[in-house]
Amino acid sequence: MSLDLSTLSVAPKAGEPLFPPLTLSVAPGQVATVMGPSGIGKSTLLDAIGGHLAHGFACTGSVQLNGRDLGPLPAEARRVGLLFQDALLFPHLSVGDNLAFGLSRRVRGRAARRAAVETALDRAGLSGLHDRDPATLSGGQRARAALMRTLLAEPQALLLDEPFSKLDVALRADIRAFTLDHIQSRAIPALMVTHDAEDARAMQGPVIDLTALSPR
């Protein structure tokens, strides 16, 4: 299960590419990190991979996941999860219902779905919080809940868009370790973009600077 980018680049239509062509293979359980200054196209790169590229942009090259070409597929068919810098939990749903929203349709029946959510809450250190209002969670709790919701959809790859940048310094090491542990335990490839070199080091994978397009 690998995520493979081959000479992938993104450009505004009738404009110059945001960065030179990127070729990269991310192995199962590995987190590759892409770095570069603001405006170079890091988040746009993730949009291209996930199938969310904004109107007015086009990409060249190819994206394959487990040997499957993602280019012709809509976002919902790609099985690529996305985690943002803000832990975007739905405010009108309880913590448990937020996780259930991401639950794979393969889990059928109310009892089975509730059990899957409770197991995920337990793994995230959120036992007993199924009925809590997301607004009452700490920053670290929200981050863990958001990751578990994404993983419950059973993605085959994960994209991380500055996922730790809004966390307090004291929380970052814990949430980094929590995220890496779950990516490794599920053996899915992940691609992270960040400005923070410490985030990149914590993920223990290859680091690509878009300004040079060479691993560090």
Image: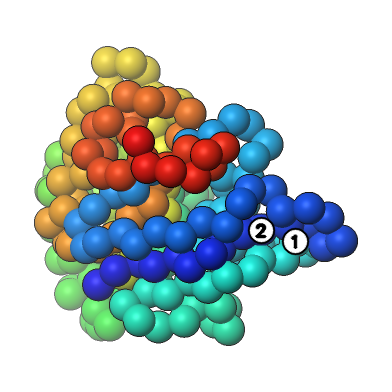
* Separation (CA) of disc 2 from disc 1: 7 Å
Q: For mark 1, does the 10 Å Cα neighbourhood hold few (<14), some (14 to 19), or many (20 or more) residues?
A: some
For label 1, the SS is strand
The quadrant of the rendering that contains the C terminus is top left
Residue that appears at 33% across and 16% down? 169
- x and y percent of residue 165 in the render? 44, 28
Q: Name the residue beneath numbered marker 2.
A: 10
For label 2, the SS is strand
The amino acid beneath tag 1 is Phe
Q: Vertical placement of 79 versus 20: above or below?
A: below
Q: Is residue 172 visible?
A: yes
Residue that appears at 47% across and 38% down? 209
Are the two marked residues, 2 and 1, in contact with CB atoms closer than 8 angstroms?
Answer: yes
Q: Name the residue beneath numbered marker 1.
A: 57
- x and y percent of residue 172 in the render? 29, 25
Q: Quadrant of residue 154?
A: bottom left
- x and y percent of residue 30 in the render? 24, 53
Q: Vertical placement of 102 versus 66: above or below?
A: above
Relative placement, left or right, of 209 versus 97 is: right
The amino acid beneath tag 2 is Val
Relative placement, left or right, of 201 versus 150 is: left
Residue that appears at 42% across and 75% down? 64
Residues 204 and 172: in front is 204
Relative placement, left or right, of 61 versus 114 is: right
Residue that appears at 87% across and 61% down? 14
Marks 2, 1: nearer the viewer: 2
